[in-house]
Image: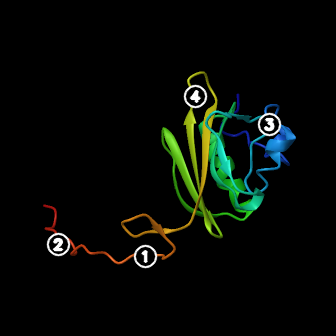
Amino acid sequence: MFSSSTPIAPSSRAGDGPALDKTQAQQFTDIPIPAGARMDLDRTLILGPRETWIGRLVFTSGAAPNDLFEFYNRELPRFGWSGITAVRAGTSVLSFSRGDRIATVQISRTTLGGSEVLVTISPRGGMDGTGFSPSPAAPSNRAPVQGQPLR
């Protein structure tokens, strides 16, 4: 078990952990995978080539959620990702951007100890009311909301 003061070492490639083989490791050259991670193949869905893939990567780790939060907060910028927001909670969420993609990392404690991590990578895009559009902001048809001050 990892303590809060024990830094998690990133694997030099995703396959350093016992459950990820070389074929799986080659898919994830743009995000860090903690050593010893065990991929959930039933819930993982990856589309596209190495540096531009999108989808969801799901794995478990023996590390505590707080340690994984610190790991991703420290390691993703080393892979060229810029932090957007982070919330540390029962289920922690970190969001990062890199080029035309957004990465969301969701970390939860597992029942028997350790953590489950969901890494979702999606294309960057704005919402126009009918779906994603390449524009950064879509015009709104709604009138501005006027409110009363709280008392």
Q: Report the side of 80 relative to 23 (left or right).
A: left
Instruction: Pick whichever of labels 4 and 1 is earlier in the sequence.
Output: 4
Compute the Cα span from label 4 to label 1.
38 Å
Location of mark 1 (residue): 137
What residue type is disc 3 on?
Leu
Q: Please name the residue shown 50% across and 40% down the image.
A: 91
Location of mark 4 (residue): 110
Compute the Cα span from label 2 to label 3.
54 Å
- 52 to 47, vertically: above or below: below
Q: Please name the residue shown 79% across and 55% down the image.
A: 29
Q: Quadrant of the N terminus?
A: top right
What residue type is disc 1 on?
Ala
* x and y percentages locating residue 144 in the rendered image: 22, 75
The label shown at residue 98 is none
Instruction: Pick whichever of labels 2 and 1 is earlier in the sequence.
Output: 1
Location of mark 3 (residue): 20
The quadrant in which residue 101 appears is: bottom right
* Kind of element beneath mark 2: loop
Nearest the viewer among 139 and 84 is: 139
What residue type is disc 2 on?
Gln
Instruction: Pick whichever of labels 4 and 2 is earlier in the sequence.
Output: 4
* x and y percentages locating residue 67 in the rendered image: 65, 41
What residue type is disc 4 on?
Thr
The label shown at residue 146 is 2
Q: Report the side of 147 relative to 10 (left or right).
A: left
Asked whether the residues under the numbered discs 3 and 4 touch, taking CB atoms below 8 Å apart as contact, a structural biologist would say: no
Task: Count neighbours of disc 2 (C-alpha within 10 A) and say few if under 14, some if 14 to 19, many if 20 or more.
Answer: few
Task: Count neighbours of disc 3 (C-alpha within 10 A) and say few if under 14, some if 14 to 19, many if 20 or more.
Answer: many
* Kind of element beneath mark 3: loop
Compute the Cα span from label 4 to label 2.
44 Å
